Image: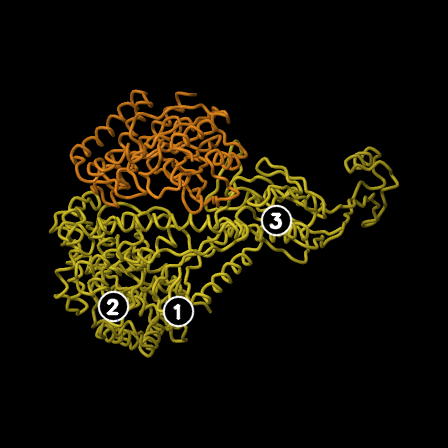
C-alpha cells in the first residue's frame, strides 16, 4: 500500500515524465494552490508553462479541533498546471491515477460539472470535480480567466486533494490514520496537535483588531506597490489579504452580506496586479 | 443511398443542463436551416448523453429543382462589339446558345441561363459550423488555442450525409465518420456511415442515446426497488435529470446506512444524500426517511461491492461532519449566540445582525397589530429568529437556514409555533387559513431585508440578484396575496425608518424608490399569473403598496375592461384625457358658472364619486361608470370648452380636470388602450 509520501513521489514523477517542472510550495498562507504565483500568474499571457508542485493550504473555517475524521484547516494539494491544455487531458489524468493504484476500469471515476470560480482571484474556469466512488479526489479546470483577464491560450489546472486520495488508497476512515511513510508515522502524529490548536486560534483567539487592521494595511500597501510598478510584491499582499479575510470569516466577524465587499476589494487588487504584469511583459 | 444527415459532437463530459440546451438549440437551428433552404425531410430527432449531442434528419431532399432565367442582350441590329461584350460577361462562347425574341417591334438577343440549385452537401458543409457556433450556452468555454466555444472540449465530430462524410471544420476539428462507445467499456473508434449503424453500434458499446430511455430505466429500477422494500421515493425533477444525464448508460446501485445516523435530523440527512451527493433517498410508508440510498453509475453491476462501499463511506463521512456541527452548535446557548450576532456586520453602516434581529422582532409586533393578531406570548422568543445564522450547520448547508433555526428552537424548548415560524421564515410561500406567527415572522424578515438593502444604497443591476432582493420581493407579494392580507407596505416602511433611526443606523429617505421597485416586481409577478401589463400598471401608484388590494383592483379592472360598459368608459376617458392636458392653475372651480344641463350633470356625478367609500372604488361599479361615460360624452358633445369668455373657459377646463383627477385617483386609466 502506498504511503502519503509515496503518493506524492509517484504523482510528481508521473507529471515530470510528462514534461512538467517540479517546482516548490509558495511560502505564504493560502486557501488553495491556485494562489501560487506559478499557477495564477503563469496562466496569464501566451508563454507555454508546465509545472507540478505540492502546496500546503489553509482554510481556517474548516478547522474541527482535530476531532472530525474528514476535515482539516491545514492540508496539502498537489497541483499541475499545463498551458496550453493537452488535447488528451482527461486520459492523462486517468493515467496519473493508475500510478497511485486507482484503476479507473475498476473504480467509478465521475467527472461532475463544476464551474470553478475564485471570486477573490477574479478567476474562473470550467471543468469538473472528479469523484472516485462518490468521493471528491480532484478538481479539473480549464482556466478561462484570471485576474479578470482572458486566458489565451487556455491552461489546464489539476488539483489533487492529497489527504482524500490517501484515505481512499489506504482505505482509512480517519485522516489522522493516514500512513505518512512505511515506518508507522501517521498524519495524526504530525498534525493532530496543530489542528487542535490552530482551530482554537482560527475560531476564538485570532485577534479581531489585528485582523481588521492587517486587512486594511495589506489593502493600502498593495495599492502603493502597484503605483510603484511592483506587481509581484503587490500580488503577495493580495495573498495575505485573502488569508486575513478567511480568518475574519472563520471568526464570524463578517456577515454574509458584507463578505461580498471584501471579496470585491481583493479581486480588484489582484486584477490590477495581473494587468500590470501583462503590461510589463509586453 | 440514403439521403439522411447524421451529426454528432463528441467530447468531454457535458453538464446536464448543457445537454438539454444543446439538443434544443441544435434542433431549432436545423429546423430554421431546412425551412430557409426549402429542404424537405421525413423526420428530425436529437439525442444526448454525458459525452455527446447528436441529430439525425431523415430522407432529405430539395423542394425546388434546377431553374433557369432569361437574360436580355443587345438588339440584333446593335453593334458587334455590344454583342461580344454581352457574350463575354455571361461566359457564352457560342452564338448558337443565344436566341432571338421580339419586344415591341424590336428584336433582341436572349440567353437562357440555367441556375443550378446549391448542392445539399455544400449547404451542410457551409451551414453546420455556423449553427454550432451560434449555440448560446449558459456557460461555454475555449480550450488550448481554439477560439470557438462549446460547453466542454470537443474531441471528435461525426458528420455524414448520404452515407458519405461531410467536409467541414469546427473548433479546429475536421468532421469524419467516427464515433466512440462508452469509454468506461471500450476505447475503440467505430466507423458509421448511417444512423442505423451508429445507433446499434453505440448500443452494443453501452450507450443509451435517448435521455428519456435512460431516465425511464432509472425510474423503473427505483420503482421496483420500492415495491420490493415497501418504500416510496420522491425526488425533484432536476435531480433525476441531472443523474440520468451524468452517464451514457445508467446502472443503479443501492446501499444502506446504519440506523445510528438517525440521531441526525432527517432534513439534514436528506440534504446530504440528495443535494451534496446527488443520490436518491427513500421514505417509509409512514413518510419517515429510510436508511436506503441509491446512486447511478456507468459501471456494470459486477463492480457493485466496491462502488457501494465507496459511496457509503462518503455519506458516512458527511453524516459525521453533520453530527459534529450539531454537537458544536448545541454547546452554545441562545443568549450567547445572540451576542455573537452583535459582532457580525449586516451591511456596512447598517449595524449588526443582533440589531437586525431586534428590528425583525419589532416589525413582527407592528405587523401583528395591523393584522389583529395577538403576538404577546411569543414576543420574547422572536429575538432568536436569526441565531441559526452563526451555526455550523448553516455555514455548511446554507440551504438549511431557517430549518436549522426551527430544529435548534425545539432543542432549546421554545414553543411549537415559534419552532415552526423559525423553520418557515425563508420559505417563498406560506399559505394559512388565518394569520399565524410563521406568516408574521416571514413578512417581517423579508420587509427588513428589502428596506435595509435600499438603505445600504447598493444597486441591483442587470439580471443578477446577488442579494436575492428580487426573489424576496416576489415572495413577499406572494405571501400577502395568497393569504389575502390587507397590509400597506408603505406604512410599514415608515416604521422601518423609525426603527433604523432608533438604532442610529443609515436609512433610506425616499421610500418612492422602494415602492417603484416593488411595483415593477408585482407587475412581473402578475404578468406571470396571466394579467396584462397595462392593466396591472394602471392599478399601481407610489402612494401605497398593498399587494392584496392591487390584486383585487387588477382582477376587477380586467373583468371591467372586458365589458361593453368598460370599453365605452375608456373611450370616454380618453376623450377627456386628450383635452385635459394643460390645466390653468391658480383658479378654483366656480359652481355658479355651471349653467348648462351637461355641466351640472358632470359636476353632480363627480360629487357623488367623491362621496363613495374608498374601498367601494376597487369593485368598479358598472352602473356608475356607465353614467360617468354618458356625462363625459354629453359634456364633450354639447359644451364648447374653449368658450370665448375667459371665466367660462377656465371654469369648464377646471371641471374636466377635476373629473380626470378624481377618476385617476384609484386607477390610472390614461395608460389603457381598448382593443376593438
**Residue B148 x %, y %:** 53, 37
Q: Secondary structure at mark 2?
A: loop
Which of the 4 image quarters holds residue A141?
A: top left
Tell which circle, 3 or 1, labels the residue nearer the N-terminal end.
Answer: 3
- Foreground mark, 3 or 1, reads 3
Query: What is chain B's hue in the picture?
Result: yellow
Q: Secondary structure at mark 3?
A: loop
Chain label for disc 3? B
Above or below: residue A18 compared with residue B295:
above
Inter-mark Cα distance, 3 to 1? 70 Å
Inter-mark Cα distance, 3 to 2? 60 Å
- Labels 3 and 2 positioned on one and the same chain: yes
The residue under label 2 is: B485
The residue under label 1 is: B571
Above or below: residue B206 compared with residue B537:
above
**Does residue B285 appear left or right of residue B469 in this picture?**
right
Q: Do callouts 1 and 2 mark residues in contact (Cβ within 8 Å)?
A: no
Q: Do callouts 3 and 2 mark residues in contact (Cβ within 8 Å)?
A: no
**Residue A255 x %, y %:** 23, 45
**Does residue B142 appear left or right of residue B521 in this picture?**
right
Q: Which chain is orange?
A: A
Amino acid at each position: 500500500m502506498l504511503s502519503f509520501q509515496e503518493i506524492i513521489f509517484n504523482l510528481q514523477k508521473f507529471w515530470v515524465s510528462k514534461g512538467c517542472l517540479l517546482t516548490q510550495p509558495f511560502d505564504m498562507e493560502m486557501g488553495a494552490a491556485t494562489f501560487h504565483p506559478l499557477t495564477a500568474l503563469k496562466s496569464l499571457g501566451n508563454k507555454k508553462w508546465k509545472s507540478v508542485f505540492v502546496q500546503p493550504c489553509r482554510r481556517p473555517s474548516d478547522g474541527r479541533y482535530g476531532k472530525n475524521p474528514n476535515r482539516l484547516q491545514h492540508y496539502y494539494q498537489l497541483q499541475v498546471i499545463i498551458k496550453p491544455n493537452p488535447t488528451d487531458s482527461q486520459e492523462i489524468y486517468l493515467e496519473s491515477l493508475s500510478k497511485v493504484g486507482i484503476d479507473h476500469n475498476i473504480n467509478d471515476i465521475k467527472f461532475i460539472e463544476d464551474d470553478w470560480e475564485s471570486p477573490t482571484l477574479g478567476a474562473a474556469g470550467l471543468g469538473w470535480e472528479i469523484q472516485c466512488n462518490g468521493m471528491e479526489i480532484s478538481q479539473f479546470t480549464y482556466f478561462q480567466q484570471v485576474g479578470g483577464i482572458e486566458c489565451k491560450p487556455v491552461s489546464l489546472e489539476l488539483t489533487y486533494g492529497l489527504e482524500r486520495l490517501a484515505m481512499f488508497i489506504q482505505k482509512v476512515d480517519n485522516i489522522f490514520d493516514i500512513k505518512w511513510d512505511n515506518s508507522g508515522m501517521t498524519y495524526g502524529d504530525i498534525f493532530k496537535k496543530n489542528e487542535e490548536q490552530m482551530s482554537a486560534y482560527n475560531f476564538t483567539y485570532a485577534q479581531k483588531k489585528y485582523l481588521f487592521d492587517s486587512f486594511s494595511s495589506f489593502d493600502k500597501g498593495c495599492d502603493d506597490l502597484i503605483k510603484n510598478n511592483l506587481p509581484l510584491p503587490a500580488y503577495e499582499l493580495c495573498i495575505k489579504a485573502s488569508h486575513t479575510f478567511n480568518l475574519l470569516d472563520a471568526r464570524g466577524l463578517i456577515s454574509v452580506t458584507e463578505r461580498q465587499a471584501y471579496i470585491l476589494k481583493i479581486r480588484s487588487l489582484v486584477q490590477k496586479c495581473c494587468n500590470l504584469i501583462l503590461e510589463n511583459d509586453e | 443511398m440514403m439521403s439522411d444527415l447524421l451529426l454528432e459532437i463528441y467530447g468531454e463530459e457535458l453538464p446536464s443542463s448543457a445537454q438539454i440546451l444543446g439538443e434544443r438549440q441544435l434542433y431549432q437551428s436545423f429546423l430554421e436551416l431546412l425551412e430557409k433552404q426549402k429542404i424537405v425531410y421525413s423526420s428530425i430527432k436529437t439525442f444526448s448523453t454525458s459525452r455527446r449531442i447528436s441529430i439525425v434528419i431523415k430522407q432529405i431532399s430539395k423542394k425546388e429543382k434546377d431553374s433557369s432565367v432569361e437574360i436580355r442582350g443587345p438588339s440584333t441590329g446593335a453593334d458587334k462589339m455590344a454583342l461580344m461584350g454581352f457574350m463575354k460577361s455571361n461566359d457564352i462562347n457560342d452564338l448558337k446558345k443565344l436566341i432571338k425574341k421580339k419586344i415591341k417591334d424590336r428584336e433582341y438577343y436572349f440567353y437562357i441561363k440555367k441556375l443550378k440549385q446549391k448542392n445539399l452537401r455544400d449547404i451542410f458543409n457551409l451551414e453546420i459550423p455556423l449553427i454550432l457556433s451560434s449555440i448560446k450556452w449558459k456557460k461555454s468555454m475555449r480550450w488550448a488555442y481554439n477560439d470557438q466555444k462549446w460547453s466542454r472540449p470537443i474531441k471528435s465530430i461525426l458528420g455524414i450525409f448520404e452515407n458519405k462524410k461531410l467536409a467541414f471544420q469546427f473548433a479546429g476539428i475536421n468532421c469524419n465518420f467516427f464515433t466512440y462507445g462508452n469509454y468506461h467499456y471500450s476505447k475503440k473508434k467505430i466507423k458509421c456511415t448511417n444512423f442505423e449503424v451508429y445507433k446499434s453500434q453505440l448500443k452494443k458499446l453501452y450507450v443509451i442515446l435517448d435521455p428519456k430511455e435512460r431516465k425511464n430505466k432509472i425510474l423503473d429500477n427505483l420503482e421496483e426497488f420500492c415495491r420490493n422494500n415497501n418504500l416510496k421515493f420522491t425526488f425533484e425533477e432536476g435531480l433525476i435529470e441531472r443523474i440520468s444525464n451524468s452517464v451514457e448508460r445508467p446502472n443503479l446501485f443501492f446501499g444502506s446506512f446504519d440506523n445510528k445516523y438517525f440521531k441526525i435530523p432527517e432534513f439534514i440527512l436528506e440534504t446530504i444524500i440528495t443535494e451534496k451527493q446527488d443520490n436518491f433517498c427513500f421514505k417509509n410508508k409512514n413518510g419517515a426517511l429510510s436508511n436506503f440510498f441509491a446512486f447511478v453509475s456507468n459501471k456494470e453491476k459486477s463492480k457493485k461491492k466496491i462502488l457501494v462501499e465507496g459511496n457509503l463511506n462518503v455519506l458516512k463521512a458527511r453524516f459525521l461532519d453533520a453530527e459534529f456541527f450539531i454537537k458544536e452548535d448545541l454547546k452554545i446557548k441562545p443568549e450567547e449566540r445572540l451576542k455573537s450576532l452583535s459582532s457580525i456586520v449586516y451591511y456596512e453602516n447598517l449595524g449588526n445582525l443582533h440589531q437586525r434581529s431586534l428590528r425583525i422582532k419589532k416589525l413582527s409586533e407592528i405587523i401583528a397589530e395591523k393584522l389583529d393578531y395577538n403576538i404577546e406570548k411569543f414576543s420574547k422568543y422572536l429575538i432568536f429568529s436569526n441565531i441559526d445564522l452563526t451555526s455550523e450547520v448553516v455555514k455548511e448547508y446554507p440551504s438549511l437556514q431557517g430549518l436549522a433555526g426551527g430544529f435548534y428552537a425545539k432543542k432549546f424548548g421554545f414553543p411549537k409555533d415559534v419552532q415552526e415560524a423559525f423553520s418557515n421564515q425563508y420559505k417563498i410561500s406560506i399559505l394559512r387559513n388565518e394569520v399565524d406567527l410563521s406568516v408574521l415572522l416571514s413578512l417581517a424578515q423579508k420587509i427588513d431585508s428589502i428596506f435595509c438593502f435600499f438603505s445600504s444604497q447598493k444597486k441591483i443591476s442587470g439580471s443578477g440578484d446577488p442579494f436575492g432582493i428580487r426573489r424576496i420581493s416576489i415572495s413577499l407579494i406572494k405571501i400577502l396575496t395568497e393569504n389575502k392580507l390587507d397590509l400597506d407596505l408603505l406604512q410599514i416602511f415608515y416604521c422601518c425608518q423609525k426603527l433604523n433611526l432608533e438604532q442610529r443606523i443609515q436609512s433610506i429617505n425616499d421610500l418612492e424608490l422602494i415602492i417603484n421597485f416593488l411595483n415593477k416586481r408585482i407587475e412581473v409577478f402578475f404578468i406571470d399569473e396571466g394579467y396584462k401589463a397595462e392593466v396591472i400598471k394602471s392599478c399601481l401608484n407610489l402612494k401605497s403598496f398593498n399587494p392584496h388590494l392591487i390584486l383585487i383592483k387588477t382582477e376587477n379592472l380586467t373583468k371591467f375592461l372586458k365589458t361593453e360598459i368598460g370599453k365605452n368608459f375608456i373611450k370616454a376617458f380618453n376623450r377627456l384625457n386628450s383635452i385635459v392636458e394643460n390645466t390653468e392653475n391658480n383658479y378654483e372651480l366656480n359652481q355658479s358658472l355651471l349653467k348648462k344641463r351637461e355641466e351640472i350633470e358632470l359636476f353632480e356625478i363627480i360629487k357623488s364619486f367623491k362621496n363613495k367609500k374608498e374601498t367601494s372604488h376597487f369593485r368598479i361599479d358598472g352602473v356608475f361608470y356607465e353614467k360617468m361615460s354618458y356625462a363625459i360624452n354629453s359634456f364633450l358633445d354639447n359644451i364648447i370648452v374653449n368658450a370665448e369668455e375667459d371665466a367660462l373657459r377656465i371654469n369648464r377646463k377646471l371641471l374636466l380636470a377635476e373629473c380626470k383627477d378624481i377618476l385617476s385617483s384609484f386607477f390610472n386609466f390614461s395608460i389603457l388602450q381598448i382593443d376593438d
